[in-house]
Image (cartoon, rainbow, N blue to C red):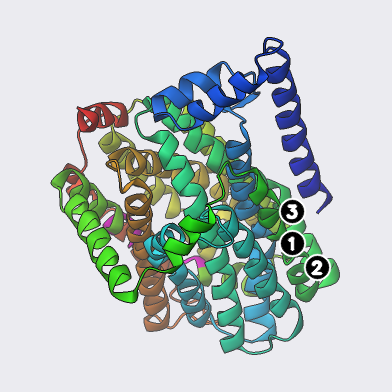
Amino acid sequence: MFVCCAFIFIMLSILGSAATRHQVTLKEGDTSNADHEGYQNRQCSADGFSKSRSKSGYFKAFGVDLSPDNVAVAIVYFVQGVLGLSRLAVSFYLKDDLHLGPAETAVISGFSALPWLVKPLYGFISDSIPLFGYRRRSYLFLSGLLGALSWSLMATIVDDKYSAALSIILGSLAVAVSDVVVDSMVVERARGESQSTSGSLQSLCWGSSAFGGVVSAYFSGSFVDTYGVRFVFGVTALLPLMTSTVAVLVNEDRLTLEERSFSLSVSSSELIERSKQRIMQIWNSVKQPSIFLPTLFIFLWQATPQSDSAMFFFTTNKLGFSPEFLGRVTLVTSVASLLGIGLYNSFLKEVPLRKIFLVTTVLGSALGMTQVLLVTGLNRKLGISDEWFSIGDSLIITVLGQASFMPVLVLAAKLCPPGVEATLFATLMSISNAGSVAGGLVGAGLTQFLGVTRDNFENLALLIAICNLTSLLPLPLLGLLPDESPTDSAQTKND
């Protein structure tokens, strides 16, 4: 928790220092005029925004100005990453306290992602129903409170799989709402920008999330070992309050009483009509081949089955990995996420999407098959311990996975046309998340079908082989993606 507070303090200090340096450069007597110009700059096009900020005196991270809005976005993503503190605790709670099997655990994990499937709904609600005069700040603030409530319930009164699933879903809902708010801010800045700037902005977001994951990774295991899962849930309940705190940094003018009254006076029929218009806007955008075909590929790419839950039970029940060691593995994967982001940001920005997906999918499938060595014990015959094998395997696979996911985000942001960018981006991400949920549920079904339980791992190697081989099935559909770099795709779209 101390590290989290230190992160916020550093970001705010940088912001304050940069703002002070910016004010010093203003000519004496021109302060009011400069403030007016600053307001105009904030309202200009994305291209103008980028140019004005490059001269603002703000510090940079990943090539992005740390303006108040960008600091708020970075911290919200940081919170998303640091919430990983509870991930191991949830897994051990479902396995050891509630005595669930790998298939049931996979189902709960799948259902916990359901709030991410209707992200456009949250965007529509925040756009249509301002709270306390704000469309962004208020929803960020309330999402933080909801997240704190959900984990407080996990720390105190939850004692069965149904209440646990409900609390986990509420926590997921809180993160999804905050994600929609900051995504809308990111997309507004990404549209019209160069590939380099857009990629850097996405790198700031996911770099902050990965850094949050690094901060919480080791403690996620050691806290479970030392204090138990309830303690971890209690600490996690404090983290979403960071989102509520930084909501004040969002650059948003408060609506006047007349504007708020007009929003609240909209009749149900008018709201329904507006909803229909928005749905038609989204559909008219999505049905365009340049958007629909890449989205279809991403869904199929994400929908391949997963064996994560079964492997968790194997490593803990069969191999005897402790929570502390699994925390170290989580730390390695968090660092690997940062490496994957750095790999994309440094070398893959201009590489065509087809080539990125082809190479990373084939390599990921091949390396994923190495888990069969761990399950069968062949790694020990090769002189590699189970612990070192798990760490190395997780490191390489995570780097490849993160590097292949980054261009998906950039392409989705660049494909969004003016007027519906926030809602359409949320729609595209919801479709991607739906693929992940489908993959998790298919994996749970395969786990059940093959008879893999908390004590029986006889068919686990077969499950791993099926999951990795099926990840290759979407490759013949690579033609659905544009045969060009994201930069060229964005320029073609803008033309």
Find residue 221 and name its label: 1
Dot 2 or dot 3, earlier in sequence: 3
Contact, mark 1 vs mark 2 (Cβ under 8 Å) = yes
Q: Which residues are magenta?
A: 300-308
- Identify residue type, mark 1: Gly
Contact, mark 1 vs mark 3 (Cβ under 8 Å) = yes
Label 1 to label 3: alpha-carbon separation: 6 Å
Q: Position of residue 472 (x, y in %)?
A: 28, 53
* Circle 2 SS class: helix
Find residue 225 and name its label: 2
Q: Residue 445, can we see it?
A: yes
Which residue position is annotated with label 3?
218
Viewer-closest of 422 and 98: 422
Mark 1: give few (<14), some (14-19) or many (20+) Cα within 10 Å: many
- Identify residue type, mark 2: Asp
Mark 2: give few (<14), some (14-19) or many (20+) Cα within 10 Å: some
Viewer-closest of 37 and 283: 37
Mark 3: give few (<14), some (14-19) or many (20+) Cα within 10 Å: many
Label 1 to label 2: alpha-carbon separation: 6 Å
Q: Which quarter of the figure has residue 97? A: bottom right
Q: Residue at x 58, y 41 (%)?
A: 251
Q: Residue at x 79, y 61 (%)?
A: 222
Q: Which quarter of the figure has residue 438? A: bottom left
* Circle 1 SS class: helix
Location of the C terminus (image quadrant): top left
Q: Residue at x 42, y 39 (%)?
A: 188
